[in-house]
């Protein structure tokens, strides 16, 4: 019975694990669909009388990527269901064979019992024993035989129940597969519709390409100014850290000078351990190093600087499909609700608060890492302020279209990196 019990427990645990995985897929799909709805709302909020712009195209492209993600999610669920249906069919076949075997064995015992059904035969079997001990063994045998028949009936009933459960499970899985197929087809139709929407929008963009190129030139001018400002801030911080390190080294050297006759000082038991990371001038104290390490350990898990965030321009150089327009962004352009809180994404110290092209800007130092928040209507902090992750530091201002918008930038020293690599997936 033990092998059967172990198999049954394995079956239950595998089904539970499968259910958990299906639940996880469905949860993820709901999150992606929620994101699509938010993107659709953000797109609808852009009034129809506005001219076609790159921010609208970015919303459509993100919506397409999310739609692909939903379809891929459904593909994964379909594979799981197919695998379960295969296992169900195999298990049903095994149970049916087991049930047939049990029924045949039981039929043979019934036939034997029928042939020896009279009480006289039973008594004769017992009293024909050659000794008292032999008679006891024969009585024990008859009891065991009856128990065996009872176990046979129990095994048949158990196997029939297992078979019934598995058949019901198979029926449910087939229904689930039908639902997933239906959902998959619907998502594919929506995808085709959104592809057409994108192609139509690209055509509109192409018709005002020269106008957009002028808008892009103005944006590039602002970004170059922002880039130069950030580079200057980082350079200043590095120089200040280097200068402090030199001063600290001079002080340490002066303290270390001893008279010639003095004995060599014993090694201190509190000496700092050998550094396990590359020495960086910006990590000039253990506290600052901890912040720096904490920032890099949270890569891919930092909170977004605003609650309702829709990326309308990604990081880096990219050509706008169907046009000759090229973007080259130093950070993320994030659409949000005008006046919403802009929050620090990690603990740090405000390096400076400054103005770029008429918009307030904050750069925060996190050890050797820097984050910058551009296009704020107001600020809550000042140079030197110590901030915590999630702390409001200002309010989001509007762009030329009247939408809330900020530009979020991440630096590792003077190198600009993709902020989306550091932020949580949404």
Image (cartoon, rainbow, N blue to C red):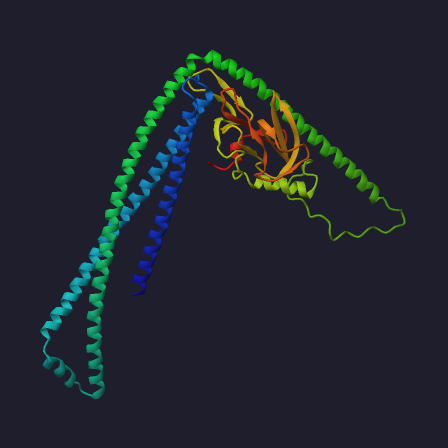
Q: Residue at x 25, y 44 (%)?
A: 174
Q: Quadrant of residue 193?
A: top left
Image coords of residue 417 (percent x, y)? 56, 30
Q: Can residue 144 be seen at all in this image of the molecule?
A: yes
Considering the image in quadrants, where does the N terminus appear?
bottom left
Image coords of residue 277 (percent x, y)? 64, 41
Image coords of residue 318 (percent x, y)? 49, 22
Q: Quadrant of residue 244?
A: top right
Q: Is residue 149 above or below residue 77?
A: below
Q: Can residue 368 be seen at all in this image of the molecule?
A: no
Q: Residue at x 23, y 64 (%)?
A: 155
Q: Residue at x 47, y 37 (%)?
A: 425
Image coords of residue 266 (percent x, y)? 79, 52
| Most foreground residue, 168 or 80 | 168
Q: Indicate left or right for 381 with 424 as reference.
A: right
Q: Indicate left or right for 7 with 340 as reference.
A: left
Q: Indicate left or right for 422 with 351 as reference.
A: left
| Most foreground residue, 337 or 224 | 337
Q: Is residue 166 above or below residue 126?
A: above
Q: Is residue 106 above or below residue 24?
A: below
Q: Indicate left or right for 28 with 342 as reference.
A: left
């Amino acid at each position: 019975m033990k092998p059967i019990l172990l198999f049954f427990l394995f079956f239950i645990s595998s089904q539970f694990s499968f259910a958990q995985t299906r639940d996880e897929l469905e949860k993820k799909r709901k999150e992606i669909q929620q994101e699509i709805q938010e993107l659709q709302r953000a797109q609808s909020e852009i009034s129809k009388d506005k001219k076609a712009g790159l921010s609208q195209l970015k919303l459509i492209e993100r919506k397409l990527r999310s739609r692909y993600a939903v379809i891929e999610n459904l593909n994964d669920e379909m594979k799981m269901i197919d695998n379960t249906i295969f296992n169900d069919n195999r298990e049903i076949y095994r149970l049916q064979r087991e049930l047939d075997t049990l029924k045949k064995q039981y039929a043979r015992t019934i036939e034997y019992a029928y042939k020896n059904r009279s009480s006289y035969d039973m008594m004769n079997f017992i009293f024909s024993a050659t000794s008292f001990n032999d008679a006891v063994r024969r009585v024990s045998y008859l009891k065991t035989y009856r128990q065996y028949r009872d176990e046979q009936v129990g095994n048949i009933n158990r196997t029939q129940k297992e078979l019934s459960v598995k058949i019901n499970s198979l029926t449910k899985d087939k229904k689930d597969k039908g639902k997933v197929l239906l959902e998959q087809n619907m998502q594919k139709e929506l995808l085709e519709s959104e592809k057409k929407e994108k192609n139509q929008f690209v055509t509109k963009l192409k018709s005002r390409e020269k106008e957009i190129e002028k808008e892009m030139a103005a944006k590039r001018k602002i970004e170059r100014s922002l880039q130069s400002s950030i580079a200057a801030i980082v350079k200043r911080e590095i120089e200040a850290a280097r200068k402090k390190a030199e001063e600290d080294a001079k002080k340490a050297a002066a303290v270390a000078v001893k008279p010639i006759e003095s004995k060599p000082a014993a090694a201190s038991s509190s000496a700092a351990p050998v550094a396990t990371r590359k020495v960086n001038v910006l990590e000039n104290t253990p506290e600052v190093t901890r912040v720096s390490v904490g920032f890099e350990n949270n890569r891919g898990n930092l909170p977004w600087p605003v609650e309702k965030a829709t990326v309308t321009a990604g990081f880096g150089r990219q050509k706008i499909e169907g046009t000759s327009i090229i973007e080259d962004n130093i950070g993320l352009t994030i659409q949000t609700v005008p006046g919403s809180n802009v929050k620090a994404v990690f603990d740090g110290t405000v390096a400076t608060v400054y103005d770029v092209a008429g918009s307030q800007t904050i750069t925060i130092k996190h050890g050797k890492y820097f984050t910058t928040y551009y296009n704020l209507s107001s600020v809550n902090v000042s140079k030197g302020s110590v901030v915590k992750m999630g702390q409001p530091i200002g309010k989001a201002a509007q762009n030329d279209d009247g939408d809330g918008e900020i530009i979020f930038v991440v630096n590792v020293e003077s190198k600009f990196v993709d902020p989306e690599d550091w932020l949580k997936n949404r």
